[in-house]
């Protein structure tokens, strides 16, 4: 398979999670790799897992958040996500990746509402969120 074909498949990859009990446990491995850090970010904020939260971001973002204090950043996201999504479930989100082999954007839809796309980059063979 050519690189162009792979990129076309990745660009067209959309994850749609149903509301069935089988989908109640979203597994990171089931998400396209480029969207995994976004899912980890949402999950870490929801459950208050600071270590997991840190792993979702690129080195550039980690340096910025380190200056602010990770606990403060996490609490800010918890407040913002609660206001924006209420008591959200990971199954309520749909992701789509558009981009190349090392960077791109993850588009997000939450319960039918389109949200701004997030920049993601590949660092050391893992995808990371590269913005706030």
Image: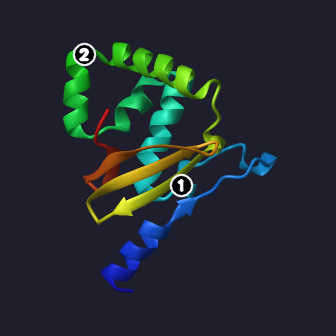
Tell me if mark 2 has few (under 14), some (14-19) or many (20+) residues whose alpha carbon lies within 10 angstroms of its own. few
Q: Quadrant of the N terminus?
A: bottom left
Check disc 1 and report its element: helix, strand or loop: helix
Q: Position of residue 102 (x, y in %)?
A: 26, 60
Name of the residue lying farthest toward the right: 21
Image position of 61 (left or right of 18): left
Q: Position of residue 89 (x, y in %)?
A: 65, 35
Image position of 36 (left or right of 60): right
Q: Position of residue 38 (x, y in %)?
A: 44, 43
26 lies above or below 81 = below
Q: Residue at x 59, y 48 (%)?
A: 27
Pointer 1 or 2: first along the chain: 1
For label 1, the residue is 29
Q: CA distance from mark 1 to mark 2?
A: 31 Å
Image position of 34 (left or right of 130): right
Q: Residue at x 62, y 24 (%)?
A: 86
Q: Quadrant of residue 100?
A: bottom left
Tell me if mark 1 has few (under 14), some (14-19) or many (20+) residues whose alpha carbon lies within 10 angstroms of its own. few
Q: Quadrant of residue 69?
A: top left
Q: Position of residue 128 (x, y in %)?
A: 33, 45
Q: Residue at x 35, y 13 (%)?
A: 72
For label 2, the residue is 68
């Amino acid at each position: 398979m050519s690189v162009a074909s792979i990129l076309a498949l990745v660009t067209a990859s959309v994850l749609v999670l149903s509301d069935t009990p089988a989908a109640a446990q979203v597994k990171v491995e089931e998400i396209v790799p480029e969207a995994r850090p976004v899912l980890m970010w949402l999950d870490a904020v929801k459950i208050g897992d600071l270590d997991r939260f840190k792993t979702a971001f690129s080195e550039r973002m980690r340096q910025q958040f380190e200056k602010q204090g990770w606990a403060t950043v996490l609490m800010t996201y918890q407040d913002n996500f609660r206001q924006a999504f209420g008591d959200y479930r990971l199954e309520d989100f749909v992701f789509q990746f558009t981009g190349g082999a090392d960077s791109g954007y993850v588009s997000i839809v939450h319960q039918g509402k389109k949200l701004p796309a997030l920049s993601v980059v590949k660092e050391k063979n893992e995808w990371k969120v590269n913005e706030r």
